Image (cartoon, helix red, strand yellow):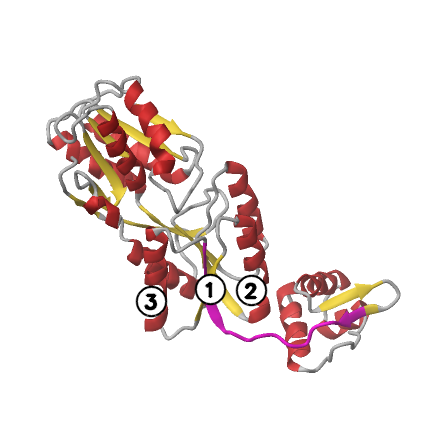
Amino acid sequence: MKVKGIYDDLRQKILGGTFQKGDRLPTTAELSKAFGCSVGMVSKAISMLIHDGIVEQRRGLGTRVIKTQSVQLDAYAFIYPSEQHEGIRRIAQGFQEAARLAERRVVMVSVGMDFRKEGEIVGRLGEFDVRGAVVYPVLPKPEDRLYFAQMLTTCRFPVVLVDIALPGFCAHSVEVDGFHAAYTMTRHLLAQGLRCIGFLANGAWGSSVQNRYRGYRWALDEAGIEERPGWVLLEPSMQPDYERPVEMSNSLTNRYLEMSRGVDGIVCGDDFMALSCLDSARELGLRVPEDLRVVGIDNYEAAALSRPPLTTYQVPFHEMGGKAFQMLDRLVQGETFSTTQILVRGVISVRQSG
């Protein structure tokens, strides 16, 4: 028997009433004989119960039950930072709709920007019979990603990440095809005769931004255009602010437009950056689209209301949420995937900015 099987058996007996609060479990030697396994395997299973707050160990007193009741939800969880972010809200709606069609109970947990809190919650969901989770983590620094990835390796149920991937950690994820998004938007500007096209994004160390930059470069290479100094600004830092997302980008877009004199079009890594570019262009006396064409990636509601309305790549957020649920459901059922990553593609929404 594997450690997980021993853990599940003991947990079920405790929560099912075979062992009452205050009871002492049999010794590890007795349990190893009963399960037909090594003492080490039993010790690992008990350590998992201690981590869940179900039992405790004291020197000379053995292992004692301290918790015998648990809320049994038999649910899937969606853990996310905030519904203030339009993309996250649409993903959550897609997840909930897919769960409703599958007649599956779900738990929605909003934790703000604290990814460590997300990790803590994921680690304890098993206490409530949550079978698996879709997680939208906000990881602004490389070290944050490393911490979160290491947390996932210890999780005892399936987890699917949405709108982010953790290369090298075999984490299942659903993302937009960033390469296709930036390639599509660059090709759109090229088709209008532009030849001096720049690229602007923050969070540049992330795989999503790197994929978008590669899509931009690929489109230029196909057109026989060599990227020139000053055309590209890949800002490594990222400080998400869901209440003022456009204003948070203003200093970056101002700096970019000052350094990139001569570009006639800009592919922005997201809509918020593109909307900030429109603001900065106005401050510098640049007319959009006459002097400069600007395109984004996302298609948030604000894109259609901007001055001028923003041409952008329509990310299928709702579909991402649905696919994340479906991937999680299949993992819970024990299915395996030929790939750990699902990429979804959108379409261009052409407006006046580019």
Indicate the quadrant containing the N terminus: top left, top right, bottom left or bottom right.
bottom right
Distance between mark 2 and mark 1 Cα atoms? 8 Å
Q: Which residue is mark 1?
A: 77
For residue 90, above or below residue 250: below
Residue type highlighted by circle 2: Leu
Q: Which residue is mark 2?
A: 125
Indicate the quadrant containing the C terminus: top left, top right, bottom left or bottom right.
top left
**324 lies left or right of 267:** right
User: In the displayed image of the protein, which residue is found farthest to the bottom?
Assistant: 17
| N-terminal-most mark, 3 or 1 | 1
| N-terminal-most mark, 2 or 1 | 1
Residue 219 in view (yes/no) = yes
Q: Quadrant of residue 246?
A: top left
Magenta part of the chain: 63-80
Residue 239 image offset from top left, x and y in percent? 44, 38
Q: Which residue is mark 3?
A: 98
> Could you tell me if the residues under marks 2 and 1 are in contact, i.e. CB atoms within 8 Å?
yes
